[in-house]
Amino acid sequence: MLVTIAGRPVHVNDEGFLTEYEEWDEAIAAALAADIGITLTQEHLAVVRFVRDDYHARSVTPTLRRVTSAGGFDTRRLFVLFPKKPAKKISYIAGVPKPVGCV
Amino acid sequence: MTNARPVPTFDDDVSGRKLCIICSKGSLDMAYPGLILANAALGEGIETHLFFTFWGYEIINKKTMGALQFCPVGNPATHMPTALSGLPGMQGMATRMMRRQIAALEVPPVPEFLELIADAGGHLWACRMSADMMKLERDDLFERVEGIIGATEFIEISAGAQTIFI
């Protein structure tokens, strides 16, 4: 469906996840983060950018394990930055689908 | 004209859910199910406890945790003739093959996986009776194990939890 985020029309699915990779920008990321109680910092954005780049390269949202092993981010820190459900929250803010991998 | 925007409620459905996994087996193929479920539960914000007992000690014993084996004997799911599966060298070969397959899926080896689970906030517990039987002490076990506890203590910790026995 078409909705307005950060003053711009974008496409989202029933859950609110962006469906068009190219419609994302940092202003939208900040609005999405605010939706779920996260104030976006450069540290958050570094993770989000890795997830977007990895999704772009592989057409699959990286799992949390991949964010740590391939992205070099610390598991404990990810749970602080994106509490409770880091993988889903990162993908929401990054404008990519929820990860489906097991590990 | 655009629609009202749906926003996911990430935290709402998780409140108070708790998972306990009892790991009682010491083979490579039986170690992973518990670790994978624990990791998935932690990623969903669920309080997760792993209790290692009996052969499950192989998973947290520093000497064995990095060298768990897969034995094809007596396992019809391998589709290997029984007479072949027991031949010398077969266990090593089957283990190497399974490790390769696990690594190909970017699933970490057991010690690294336990580290990941502990970093994600998972609680690792070792069984008191198993330690006594196997003459093992705290120092023999993986550093991230929080303690050696008795069955009663485990029952206390697991109050209100969904419990899985592997």
Image (tube, rainbow, N blue to C red):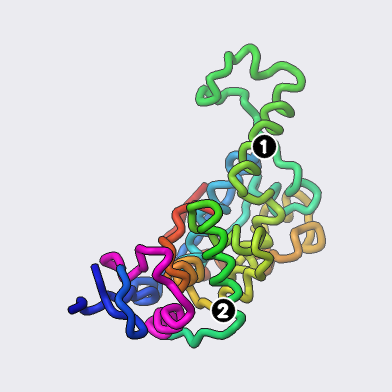
The answer to whether residue A2 is magenta is no
Q: Where does the image place residue A50, in percent across and percent down from the top left?
A: 59, 66
- Quarter-wise, where is residue B99 in the image? top right
- Quarter-wise, where is residue A32 in the image? bottom left
Magenta residues, as a range? A12-36
Can you tell which mark lies on residue B100?
A: 1
Q: From what the image shows, is residue A98 above or below residue A79?
A: above
- Name the subunit of mark 1: B
- The residue tagged with tag 2: helix, strand or loop? helix
Q: Where does the image place residue A47, in percent across and percent down from the top left?
A: 58, 72
Check disc 2 and give the amino acid type: His
Q: Where does the image place residue A81, in percent across and percent down from the top left?
A: 56, 79
Question: A88 or B84, which lies in front?
Answer: A88
Q: Is residue B110 left or right of residue A26?
A: right
- Name the subunit of mark 2: A
Can you tell which mark lies on residue B119?
A: none
